[in-house]
Amino acid sequence: YKVNPHTLSAGVEKQWNRYLFSGNYSLTWSEGRNASGLTEPLPDVDDRVDNYLHSLAFGMEYAWKKNMSVRGTYIYDYYKDHVYHDLSGGYNTLMLGLNYRL
C-alpha cells in the first residue's frame, strides 16, 4: 500500500450568555495505490485511491442549569471518489444531546 492521506480543519466557537455556538469545516483527501495482485495488476478501480471528504458542522449548546446543558449539532458530509464514482454522495446528520457535568 502507498496511500497518502491529508486533512485540513478549521473551527470557531462563540459564547453569548448561556449559549455556545460552534462551526467546523474539515477537508480530507487521499491519493495513492493499493497493493497489487500477486501475479497480475489489479483493475484500476481496485488499485487507485483518489477521494475527498468535506465535512461541515454547526452546533449550539444551551446551559440549562449549572451542570446540565442541551446541545444540537447539524453535520453535512460530502464524499467524492474519483475512481469508484458510485460511492460519491452527501449525507445530513442531526444530533441532539443532553450533557451532564460532574
Image (cartoon, rainbow, N blue to C red):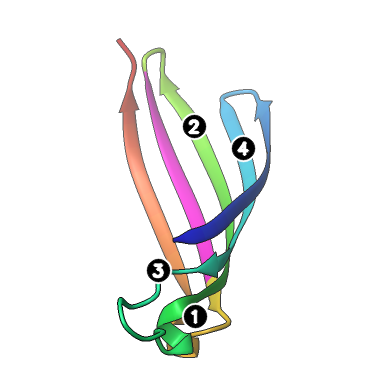
* N-term-proximal mark, 3 vs 4: 4
* N-term-proximal mark, 2 vs 3: 3
Q: Is residue 94 left or right of residue 61?
A: left
Amino acid type at mark 1: Gly
Q: Residue placed at 44% from the left, 61% from the top?
A: 1
* Residue segment shown in magenta: 68-78
* N-term-proximal mark, 4 vs 2: 4
Distance from Cα at disc 1 to Cα at disc 2: 32 Å
Q: Residue placed at 41% from the left, 84% from the top?
A: 41
Q: Is residue 89 left or right of residue 101?
A: right
Compare residues 13 and 34 and report the one nearer the observer.
Answer: 34
Res. 1 mark: none
Residue 7, placed above or below residue 69: below
Mark 1 = which residue? 89
Image marks 1 and 2: residues in contact by CB distance under 8 Å:
no
Mark 4 = which residue? 21
